[in-house]
Amino acid sequence: MWPLKPLHRRGRKPSLANLFARYFLIAMAAELAIIIGFAFMLGKLYQNSDNESARRTLDGPVTLIVRELQRHPHAQWEHELAAISRDFSYPVRLIAHPPADLDPDSRSYFARHKTYLDFDNNLLYAPLPGDSRLLLLGPLDSSNNGSDSTWISEDIEVLLLWILFTGTTLSLLIYFYLRPMWRDLVSVREAAEVFANGDFHVRTPQARSRLFAPLSVALNSMAARLERLLDIHQAMSHAVAHEIRTPIARLRFGLTMLDEEDDPNERQRYSEGMERDMQELEELITASLEYAKLTRGESILNREQVDLYDWFDDLLQLVEPLKPPHIELGMDCVKGMGRFDRKLIYVASRNLLLNAFKYAQQQVRLSVSRQDGMLVIVVEDDGHGIPEADRERVFEPFRRLDRSRDRSSGGYGLGLSYVRLIAEHHGGSAHVESSPLGGARFVLAVAEN
C-alpha cells in the first residue's frame, strides 16, 4: 500500500491571508449591498414626502419673486428677474414652456397654478399669473454649478467614510476571530497528514477555539485508540505465534513417534497427547478471537438489572468447585440492585477469583460496593502480591509473570487482559494494588449507566 500524499501537495496550500481576504471581501460586499439596498428602499419610501416638503419650502421664495415681478410690466420681467437672480445661489429665469420630457404629472400642478419640483434634475417650475411663461429655479444644488463644484458628492463622501470605518473594524474582528481557528485547523490538518502516512504517535495540541476543540479531542482520542489497537494487534500476533509453537512442536514430535512406535499402548498415549495438543490449539485460537472481538468493541453491552447480593452469591457457588480446599473464600457485598452485562461481568469476576486462587495461601475475599456512581468489585488474596513494576504488565495479553507454572495452571495470559477490556467496555477501569491481607488487590470499577 503506497503512502498517501500530504494534503498540501495535492493543490495550492491555503493560508490565513487567503482565508481572511475571502471572508473580508464577502463581508464588505454584503455590507455594501445592504447599505445601498437600504438607502434605495428609504429613498423610494420617502421620495414623495421629501418632494412635497421641498416644494412647499420653495413656495416662499417663488411667491416673493412673483410679487416683485408683478410690480413691473411684463415686458420688463426679464430685466427685473436678472437683477433678482443675483441675490440667489442658484439660477432663476423665465422659460416659454416646460420641457417635452417633463413628468406628465406636472401638467396637473400647472393647471392648479401650483409649483412643480423635478426632484431628479433638482429644478423647480412655477406658473406665473396672467402669463403663459414659467418661472424656472435651479438647479437648486449650488455644488453642481460653478467653480465650487467638486467631483465627488457629499453623500458619496459619507458613504466612503462609513465603508472605511466599518471595513477597518470588520477586518480586525474577522482577523482576530479567524486567527485562533486557523491555528487549530493547521494543527489538525498537519496531524491528519501524519495519520494518513500511518504514524499514530502524533497528537494535536489543545485547540483554543470552541469550534475545533471537539475535533482536536476526537482526533487525539482516535489516534490513541488506533495506536493502542495496533500495539495490541502486534503484541497478539507475536504472542500467538510464540504460543502456537509449543503445541505444534509437540504434534510434530507425536507424529514422528507414532510412526516409529509399534506398541499399541504407546501409540494410544501419543494419540491422546496429540488430541490434547489439538484441543490446546483450538482453545488458543478461540481465546484470541474473543479477545480481539472485545478489543475492537464489537461486543454489544446487554445491561440488565440484577440483585447484587444474590448474583455475586451465585457466582461464589459456581466457582466453589474450582477453589482449592485449603482456601477460605469470603464475600462482603452491598445491598441493592445493579445494572451491567451479566455475561461479561461474570467472566471478569470469575477470572479475578481464579487468579486469586492460584496465588492465595489461605484466604481470598470478594468485596462489592458503590463509589462515585461506579460499581466497584474487589478481589484480594493473602499471597505474595505483585511487584509495583509489574502491576501494569499483568494486564497485557499473553503475559505470564510466573514462568514456573505450566499451561495447565497458567493459561494463556488473557484472563486479566479480559478483565481490563470488560471494565473499559463498561466505561470503567481495572488496576491492581497491595492488599491489607498481604497479597494482591484487584479493583474492577464499572459504570452502571
Image (cartoon, rainbow, N blue to C red):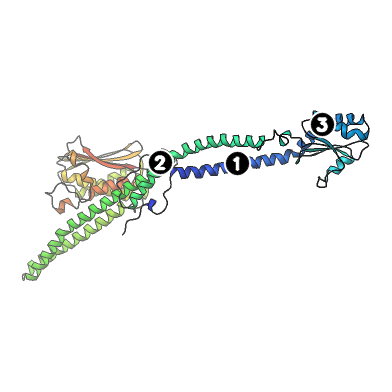
Element assignment for label 3: helix
3D distance between C-alphas at marks 3 and 2: 69 Å
What is the quadrant of residue 123 in the picture? top right
Q: Which mark is residue 85?
A: 3
Looking at the picture, tell me which residue is in the foreground, 93 or 154: 93
Task: Identify which amino acid the numbered label 2 is placed on.
Answer: Arg
Give the crowd class for mark 1: few <14, some 14-19, many >=20 residues within 10 Å.
some
3D distance between C-alphas at marks 1 and 3: 41 Å
Give the crowd class for mark 3: few <14, some 14-19, many >=20 residues within 10 Å.
some
- Numbered disc in front, either 2 or 1: 1
Q: Quadrant of the C terminus?
A: top left
Element assignment for label 1: helix
Task: Identify which amino acid the numbered label 1 is placed on.
Answer: Leu
3D distance between C-alphas at marks 2 and 1: 30 Å
Label located before the other in sequence (2 or 1): 1
Task: Identify which amino acid the numbered label 3 is placed on.
Answer: Ser
| Residue 257: image location, x then y, percent | 8, 67
Q: Which mark is residue 183?
A: 2
Q: Quadrant of the N terminus?
A: bottom left
- For residue 382, above or below residue 222: above
Q: Residue at x 89, y 31 (%)?
A: 69
Give the crowd class for mark 2: few <14, some 14-19, many >=20 residues within 10 Å.
some
Element assignment for label 2: helix
